[in-house]
């Protein structure tokens, strides 16, 4: 069952607020790493499984990830099931993948349908 347009609009506003919070939090983390005397970053390329149904949803996810400091979307697999992301500090890759899915993908999925 498709969700109503007003409910999806509320979800879009919530996603915007969540993105702004993540933007601020990530900006501070990247600034700390950039200005640290001895930066301790562990960059990595991560495979993030995605369950979004539309090209638009996938594009929104990829762009939100790229716009968040410290992460950059690199590629979407041909079957549209995996988003490859570069993370500046991936000391716990599973937590980063779970955070992307929980913070952005789940909310985008609600807006999709």
Image (cartoon, rainbow, N blue to C red):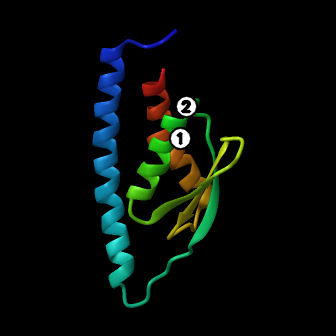
- The answer to whether mark 2 and mark 1 are in CB contact below 8 A is yes
Q: Secondary structure at mark 2?
A: loop
Q: For the point 30% across and 67% down, which residue is it?
A: 28
Q: Secondary structure at mark 1?
A: helix
Q: For mark 1, does the 10 Å Cα neighbourhood hold few (<14), some (14 to 19), or many (20 or more) residues?
A: many
Q: For the point 34% across and 76% down, which residue is it?
A: 32
Extreme residue in the top direction? 1
> How many numbered marks appear?
2
Q: Which mark is residue 17?
A: none
Extreme residue in the right direction? 79
Q: Position of residue 106 (x, y in %)?
A: 49, 34
Q: For the point 59% across and 62% down, which residue is it?
A: 92
Tell me where residue 55 sits by quadrant: top right
Give left or right: position of 29 versus 98: left
Give left or right: position of 3 versus 82: left
- The residue where tag 2 is placed is 54
Q: Position of residue 77 (x, y in %)?
A: 68, 49
Give left or right: position of 97 versus 113: right
Extreme residue in the bottom direction? 37
Q: Is residue 107 above or below residue 113?
A: below
Q: For the point 50% across and 48% down, which residue is it?
A: 99
Tell me where residue 44 sits by quadrant: bottom right
Structural distance between the alpha carbons of marks 2 and 1: 6 Å
Tell me where residue 85 sits by quadrant: bottom right
Q: Position of residue 112 (x, y in %)?
A: 47, 26
Q: Position of residue 3 (x, y in %)?
A: 43, 13
Q: Which mark is residue 58?
A: 1
């Amino acid at each position: 069952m498709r969700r109503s347009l007003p409910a999806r609009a509320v979800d879009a506003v919530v996603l915007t607020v969540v993105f702004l919070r993540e933007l601020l939090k990530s900006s501070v983390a990247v600034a700390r790493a950039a200005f640290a005397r001895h930066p301790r970053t562990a960059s990595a390329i991560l495979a993030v499984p995605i369950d979004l149904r539309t090209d638009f949803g996938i594009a929104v996810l990829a762009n939100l990830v790229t716009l968040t400091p410290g992460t950059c979307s690199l590629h979407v697999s041909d079957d549209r099931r995996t988003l490859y992301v570069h993370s500046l500090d991936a000391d716990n890759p599973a937590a980063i993948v779970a955070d992307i899915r929980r913070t952005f993908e789940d909310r985008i999925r609600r807006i999709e349908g």
